[in-house]
């Protein structure tokens, strides 16, 4: 049984920073992709950033240069460092796991953590 638990969401002012954590437990597989998605009010859930088991990263254009995804393999934790936050970054942020051989399909979601950017 895989479990993904997000933490670190908060309310911050524009220009501020937050670091989100996704703690993964269970059999996440040796070949996998862990991603951060977000869903704002009235919007669909979109990919923010992802990282593979061997450290390859991918970012949405809207967050390039502001967000950084990283991982600590000793803890099975994936981080999302978010800098220069904007009001449009306000959303629930979800952790997502895709496992080999079904790397185009979601294996698990976390429950999400709320990020609010407002003055």
Image: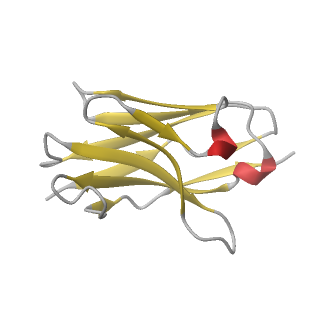
Q: How many marks?
A: 0
Q: Residue at x 32, y 42 (%)?
A: 23
Q: Is residue 10 visible?
A: no
Along the viewing direction, whichever of 57 and 89 lies nearer the viewer: 57
Residue 74 is drawn in which quadrant? top left
Q: Position of residue 78 (x, y in %)?
A: 37, 36
Q: Residue at x 28, y 61 (%)?
A: 108
Up the image or down, 41 lies above or below 75; here it is below
Q: Position of residue 104 (x, y in %)?
A: 31, 60
Q: Is residue 45 visible?
A: yes
Find the residue positioned furthest to the bottom: 42
Decide if residue 38 is on the left or right side of residue 5.
right
Q: Quadrant of the C terminus?
A: top right
Q: Quadrant of the N terminus?
A: bottom left
Up the image or down, 34 lies above or below 81; here it is below
Q: Residue at x 29, y 64 (%)?
A: 105
Q: Residue at x 26, y 29 (%)?
A: 54
Decide if residue 37 is on the left or right side of residue 33.
right
Residue 30 is drawn in which quadrant? top left
């Amino acid at each position: 049984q895989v479990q993904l638990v997000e933490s670190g969401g908060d309310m911050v002012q524009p220009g501020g920073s937050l670091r989100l954590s996704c703690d993964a437990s269970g059999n996440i597989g040796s070949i996998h992709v862990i991603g951060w998605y977000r869903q704002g009010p009235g919007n669909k859930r979109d990919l923010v950033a992802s990282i593979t088991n061997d450290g390859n990263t991918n970012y949405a254009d809207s967050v390039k240069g502001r967000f950084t995804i990283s991982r600590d393999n000793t803890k099975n934790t994936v981080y999302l460092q978010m800098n220069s936050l904007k009001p449009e970054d306000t959303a629930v942020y979800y952790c997502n796991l895709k496992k080999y051989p079904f790397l185009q399909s979601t294996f698990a979601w976390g429950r999400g953590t709320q990020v609010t950017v407002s003055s």
